[in-house]
Amino acid sequence: MSQTAFQRALQEVSDRRIRAQKMQEDRCQEIEEKIPEIAEINRTLSQTIFRIMNGEDFETIKKQNLQAQQICRDKLKEHHYPGDYLDLHYTCPACCDTGYVNNGEYCECVKKLASDYAADDMHKISQIQLCSFADFSLSYYQEPETSKYYAYVSQILKFCQDYAANFSLDSQSLLFWGEPGTGKTHLSLAIVTEVLKKGNTIIYDSIGNLLSKVEKEHFQKQETLETDTLQLLLDTDLLVMDDLGTEFQSSFSLSALYTIINTRINRHLPTIISTNLEPEEMTEMYQSRITSRLFKVYQTIKLVNVDVRKKKSEKNNLTMHFE
Ligand SMILES: [Zn+2]
């Protein structure tokens, strides 16, 4: 089984640490060959532990070592090297490339890497490249029977284009609903394609896949990594979950879904959800704590199916609810 995004991120951070240490060793060797005075100082510094063990005064040793290090820096500059040439240069000063800060929490650098890896994985398996706003055809809505929807669907397309163009972490969350084949996934992916170009982290998948992954990790209890997918879903800049209502439902999945929706709202992070369910069906299928969050906080966008237009036209009340 392939490594999770978090495991790969921790591995990369660990490799960075090893590379930083190797670079320092190589530089030391290079400089000691070129500047004998520094080699001599380094030999003296390496005796520090024995001097402490022999009971020499710690403060005196410390003072002498600081002076020795300053001499090294001056010597380096004399030879046209940066003063910190022999220091350890970690990629992330916050965690010194250990991946952890404070009391064992993941450092931001790990979260960012894991999120990037997850986005890469998503990029590989999805057909994002194939969906763009330019491919979203309005021609279906130019027939005599469907032309009454043309203005409405054009408005939705324009809204989504503006949403993608102006995307930020303050962007609102969206709920696309409508029957299959109405372009919900196409519009979601066209937004994803544009937002990816801005360098934001995105996770896109069906709700079923995402929740089953979270559930599996939870019950496998892989030590601290048990909830890494959930963590990624809570942290990513944009989360796009397709096909609400098709997932296998359990008390765990409902609870996880609520956690994802609610936490991201509280963190003001945008989420896009699509569903084939009518609002009444959503109300029946999900607890009110979930639907009330969706209907009150999300921008709801109804897509129309031209194939069922006659059947639906009587009862369709086409609206976009702008807050
Ligand atoms: Zn870090």
Image (tube, rainbow, N blue to C red):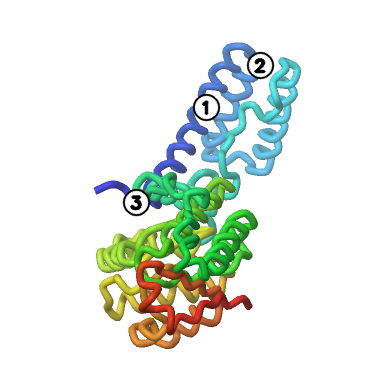
Left or right placement of residue 47 versus residue 9 in this view: right
Residue hosting label 1: 23
**Which amino acid is tagged 3?**
Thr
Residue hosting label 2: 37
Of the 4 image quadrants, the one containing the C terminus is bottom right
- What kind of element bears circle 3? loop
Q: Earlier in the sequence, mark 2 or mark 3?
A: 3
Q: Earlier in the sequence, mark 3 or mark 1?
A: 3
Q: CA distance from mark 2 to mark 3?
A: 48 Å
Residue 41: % across, % down: 63, 23
Regarding residue 281, the answer to whether it shows in the image is: yes
Left or right placement of residue 163 versus residue 303 in this view: right
**Which amino acid is tagged 1?**
Met
Q: CA distance from mark 2 to mark 1?
A: 21 Å
- What kind of element bears circle 2? helix
Residue 319: % across, % down: 54, 77
Residue that extends furthest to the front in the rendered view of this protein: 144
Q: Marks 3 and 1: CB-CB under 8 Å?
A: no
Residue 87: % across, % down: 61, 32
Regarding residue 109, the answer to whether it shows in the image is: no
Left or right placement of residue 270 versus residue 219 in this view: right
Is 177 or 106 nearer to us in this picture?
A: 177
Residue hosting label 3: 4
State the residue at coordinates (67%, 30%): 84
Q: Marks 2 and 3: CB-CB under 8 Å?
A: no
Q: Residues within 10 Å of mark 3 (few under 14, many from 20)?
A: some
